[in-house]
Amino acid sequence: MDADVIVVGGGFVGLHTAYRLHKSGLRVVVVGGEDPRKGASWGNAGLIHQGSTTTVPEIMGFWRVVRLALRRGSYISSNPWIALRESLPGGWLWRYARSLKKEQLTERAALLAGLVRESKKQWLGIIRGEGLDAELLERGSIEVYFSDELFSLESRVVSEEAARLGYRVQVLDAEKCRELEPLLREGVAGGLYYLDDAWVNPSKTLNSFISTLQRLGVKIVWEKARGVREEGGGVRVEVESGGLGAGHVVLAAGAWTRNLLKSLGAKIPLIAGRGYLAVSEPVRARLARPLFYADEKIVVGQTLDGNLRLTSYFELNNPDAPLDRSKIIQMVRKVKDALRLEGELRIIDEWVGSRPCIPDGLPVVGRVGDKGRVLVATGLCRLGLTLSPTTAMLVEDIITGRENPLLRHFSPARFT
């Protein structure tokens, strides 16, 4: 066999999984896909966000999501044919609507809050222990609102949730918002300051992590996985140059995991929730910390060189559909409405990527297939960077046979 474990996926989930399994003494090969830039990790917002209690974009009710999707210029949109297909019984939207019961949301929020805390601890350990070039920033993040109504509602909901789940957040008035972030324009209604958030530059971190794994001796094959099949006492992954064999395979290929599962006769309700990234030329003005423009759901981060990274949108579409440039233009305009930036904000890089989203807002981690030698680790949607370390921990627990009661909540079997 070529390895003890083949990890299919070159994003943060796949890399963290390969790292943990290598550290536990297993021979690991990563099938990373065609290019790191194609995966959702490249365009991540970069926040390790302590208030992350769902991977999907809205928990305020199904019909609010429908209204947002129909509103021109909204951060939620959908290909009409996909929306129709996924609204049918058993479809993604159908399942999403059925998962919005209050007691379910409360239970899932508690599960994710625990994973987020542990993930931050593991991220910091790896960044510092391996010397990753991550541009790590530990100043928290600020979520700002220009709508009084939205601020009033969400500040109350988040304050109650933070008290229940044990993360730190401060409610800020308009004056305090501008004190913490002097670049904000007038008209801010208030904000939420997440004291324990951290930020990394996703593309730099991804490249640095890849280099670290290669330095440690993990082989990375930059080819696309064509299929997976169980044979004999192991599993075979077909790539463009041939085939690779291993005792176990971990499918962490993001939104493309759904296609690989078909070759095993397995199925999970996974859909591509696409996000957009725009990177500006370096600007002289400096953000004090990452900023989340809550009204328009845009995260603004800044690299050490001064480039602004704008990320937004939840677009249900084909994973390989082309970039909609109108969304980039709209995102830039909205950010300039919120921040005092001198001159034109020139965009030097545009990107769209497909995030793997599950309707109940929880990841999927567990065995699939007839022989149990294939594992799936996907569905982190907008929290791929944040939750990748603890997702890798869950995978390691399965492969090494370590008991973990959390695994039952994330099992693929919950959809059968």
Image (cartoon, rainbow, N blue to C red):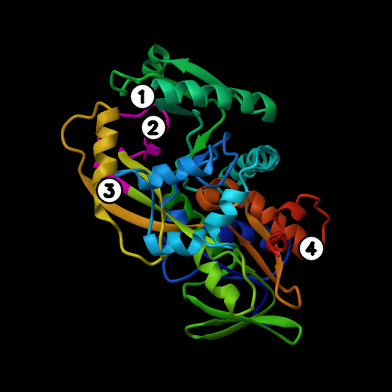
Residue 240 seen from this side: yes
Upstream in sequence: badge 2 or badge 1: 1
Task: List the residue tagged with mark 3.
Answer: 328
The mark that comes first in sequence, 4 or 1, is 1
Along the polypeptide, which appears first: circle 2 or circle 3?
2
Q: Viewer-proximal residue, 258 or 176?
A: 258
Which stretch is magenta? 278-306
Q: Quadrant of residue 298?
A: top left
Q: Are marks 4 and 2 in contact (CB under 8 Å)?
A: no
Please provide percent x and percent y for residue 368: 70, 70
Q: Residue at x 60, y 56 (%)?
A: 16
Would residue 310 appear left or right of 266 to someone viewing this image?
left
In this rendering, does residue 282 appear at all?
A: no
Name the residue tied to disc 1: 146
Which image quadrant for residue 119? top right
Q: Residue furthest top?
A: 175
The kind of residue on which mark 3 rests is: Ile
Residue tagged 4: 400
Measure the alpha-carbon separation of dots 2 and 3.
17 Å
Residue 256 at x, y = what percent?
A: 50, 68
Which mark is nearer the camera, 2 or 3? 2
Q: Decide: marks 2, 1 in contact (CB < 8 A)? A: yes
Q: Amino acid at mark 2?
A: Asp
413 over 325 or under it: above or below? below
